[in-house]
Image (cartoon, helix red, strand yellow):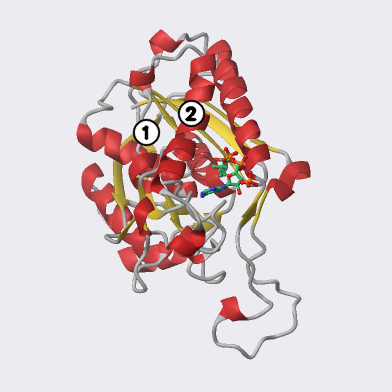
Amino acid sequence: MSTSFGVVLLGTGSSLPTRSLRNSDFPASLDTSDEWIRSRTGIQERRIATPSETSGSLALTAAHRALEAAQLHPADVDMIICATVTPDMMVPSNACFIQRGLGCRPIPAFDVNAACTGFLYALTIAAQFIRTGSCRRILVIGTETLSRIVDFSDRTTCVLFGDGAGAVVIGASDGQGRGQHWFRLYSDGSRGDYIRYNGVRLRAPASTSADPRASDQFDFLRMNGREVFKFAVRTIIELIGEILAECNLTPADINLVIPHQVNQRIIDAAFADLSFPTDKLMVNLDRYGNTSAASIPIALDEAMRTGRATAGDRVLLIAFGGGLTWAGGVWTI
Ligand SMILES: CC(C)(COP(=O)(O)OP(=O)(O)OC[C@H]1O[C@@H](n2cnc3c(N)ncnc32)[C@H](O)[C@@H]1OP(=O)(O)O)[C@@H](O)C(=O)NCCC(=O)NCCS
């Protein structure tokens, strides 16, 4: 077991748009149904940002809540890392927007893009700075407004995603036993076409339209659902097998698993194969859909605030997404 102590979770927070979109709210023209969406994905509703809500503003609220939970002030933060594929703008980054909004002193602040795996990438990067002693406290955020990049006339994608933000503060600790024990990050760019979002094509001719969706510069998120489904199930099974073997653990040693909130069928298929008790799974995708980089920190915050995860619990985090990317980690909180 590759053991590292000294990086602990100090507080969590989240922020979700107030506007809810239930399955039955999709227009008849989409040719879908509540029954189809529930049975194929487990999703019942998702949150959709209002025009005044952005991935930056949701992140800022989540960050405030995480600092409050950690009983820390913005002045205590040594670094901000924000995972997102839907930043408010390319420059400045969401992390810089958050640094300004919190009123932090000048500190490193940057965004990370590893799609739905982004939060675990950001958390792992942050943990390295803590471990080396370069930083004492780091704010790590996952935030998305996927509703702004999905095609609401494409029933194969738009029913799956939602908006929201989650944040954690991690810090250095001298205590033994708590903290991050194991992590692994992966990518395979050769399968990048499975999930793709071009965004603004920087080399395309300038458009005169005020609405980027009306111009040839904007595309929507596209996905090969069947291939992603197979990749996701296989990845959960293989990565959890790897984690348990390398850490010399069994499912009985894990108190809670927080998987990327992707699709109930994917989670069920993978964990049935792993013989994992389902009561150890934290799932809230029925209410929020897939919020990409925000999904794990939102679920972690919910687990902490509802008492599903308490101090001393060993929690397994696992994510996968566009890139393709995937990652896992074990923390004792
Ligand atoms: C997208 C997904 C739900 C589709 O479910 P599926 O059981 O694989 O369905 P299929 O792709 O085989 O499509 C079956 C039929 O349902 C239709 N369908 C797709 N979405 C539909 C919807 N929202 N409502 C009604 N019918 C739908 C398809 O058009 C297809 O119709 P056809 O047979 O007439 O062509 C599933 O593949 C999935 O969840 N993949 C993973 C995607 C994901 O989570 N990506 C993010 C990863 S981070």
Residue at 30% across, 43% down: 12
The residue where tag 1 is placed is 283
* Residue lying furthest right: 190
The reply to whether residue 170 is visible in this rendering is no
The residue where tag 2 is placed is 267
Q: Position of residue 278 (x, y in %)?
A: 38, 19
Residue at 59% across, 48% down: 114
Give the spatial CA distance, label 2 vs label 1: 9 Å
Give the quadrant of residue 38. top left
* Residue lying furthest bottom: 208
The reply to whether residue 163 is visible in this rendering is yes
In-image side of 82 versus 69 (left or right):
right
Residue at 52% across, 31% down: 266
In-image side of 228 versus 140 (left or right):
right
Give the quadrant of residue 52. bottom left
Residue type at tag 1: Val
Check whether the beta carbons of the residues at disc 2 and disc 1 lie within 8 A of each other: yes
Q: Which mark is residue 157?
A: none
